[in-house]
Amino acid sequence: MERLAYRINKAGSINNLKLSSENLPEPTKNEVKVQIKAIGLNFADIFAIQGLYSATPKGSFIPGLEYSGIIVKKGSEVNEFEIGDKIMGAIRFGAYANYLNINKNYIQKLPSDWSFEEGAAFIVQSLTAYYSLIELGNIKDQSTILIHSAAGGVGIYANRIAKRFNAYTIGTVGNEKKIQLLKKEGYDDVIVRGDDFSEKLKKRLVNRDLDIVLECIGGKIFSESFKQMSAGGRIIVYGAAQYSTGGSSPNYLNVLTKYLARPKVDPLSLSDKNKSVMGFNLIYLWDKVELMKKYLIKIFEMNLPKPLIGEVFDFKELLSAVKKFQTGQTVGKVIIKVD
């Protein structure tokens, strides 16, 4: 069958994304064919498009990691799902399309009271937050947690999970417009990042140990967060937004300058200060599908609120949506609606 997909022939610029018609083969025996109804945007999409992501496929590829939709065909060995089932799923690139084939192991049935938009906003955010806080962060009751980019999809789910452990959460955002949302979400304190970030954080931590940091920005934000973390603290790095320079194409000189000036941690200082630096990339879980399924079950058992949807764009507006998302001015999950 013919499908529509946003394909990029060579990573480097958002403007290289082109919508075109192409052939999609029949699903194999363990696959289903999904009519996509909603696509969730992630910062990893931008890094892949601009060629700044180590997992970026070589040559031509279709970006996109998560989606929701309806099963329209299934392979001969797919017994867990039926044609017509509403599902949500993750894919190792390929979601920027109106149809796709995917192995049955990488989809979940959409909860009956969830919209397609909510389904496309769940898997990547919740898994990243859960794995970072629980598996890596070893969160304890009444921990103090600093969550950067707190108004994004991961930040919102991180706070919701942390509150299940009675944690004290401090969220950071890039502008004051996002403060009200974080208060509504139950953050205990909010910091608007700026040149005075170090001083602001220091004031928030008077008589309080900083146990866990979820870090996705890099540079001075990483350095100050690590510096003020208490003994026994853990900083989990799952992104590096500072390297996205804001334009359709990377400013390679700017990226190189930031890369050369990136923070460096002396391994001896880790044992001296009893601190841990950990990294996490969700792609790691792709080849550990049973582990991913186990974590998703545990997340559902927490009975967390539905995903928070920010702006919704039409499929034909995908390029505009990606550029808007790149600015960091959005809140919640940015969704592409596919008719």
Image (cartoon, grey):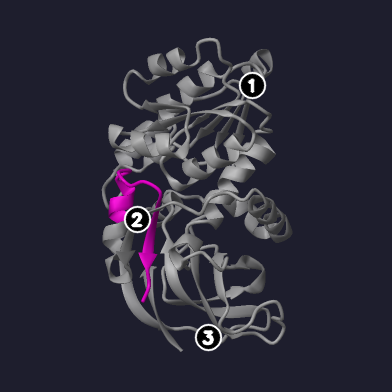
Q: Which residues are magenta?
A: 322-339
What residue is rendered at 31% in x and 63% in y? 313
> Which amino acid, by three-letter code, is at mark 2?
Gly
Q: Secondary structure at mark 2?
A: loop
State the separation of the CA atoms marked 3 and 1. 50 Å
- Badge 3 vs badge 1, beta-carbon distance below 8 Å: no
Residue 25, numbered label? 3
What residue does disc 1 label?
A: 275
Residues packed near mark 3 inside 10 Å, few (<14), some (14 to 19) or many (20 plus)? few
Examine the rendering and report whether any part of residue 65 can be seen: no
Label whose residue precedes the other's in the sequence (3 or 2):
2
Residues packed near mark 2 inside 10 Å, few (<14), some (14 to 19) or many (20 plus)? some
What residue is rendered at 44% in x and 37% in y? 150
**Quarter of the view holding residue 173:** top left
What residue does disc 2 label?
A: 12
**Quarter of the view holding residue 297:** bottom right
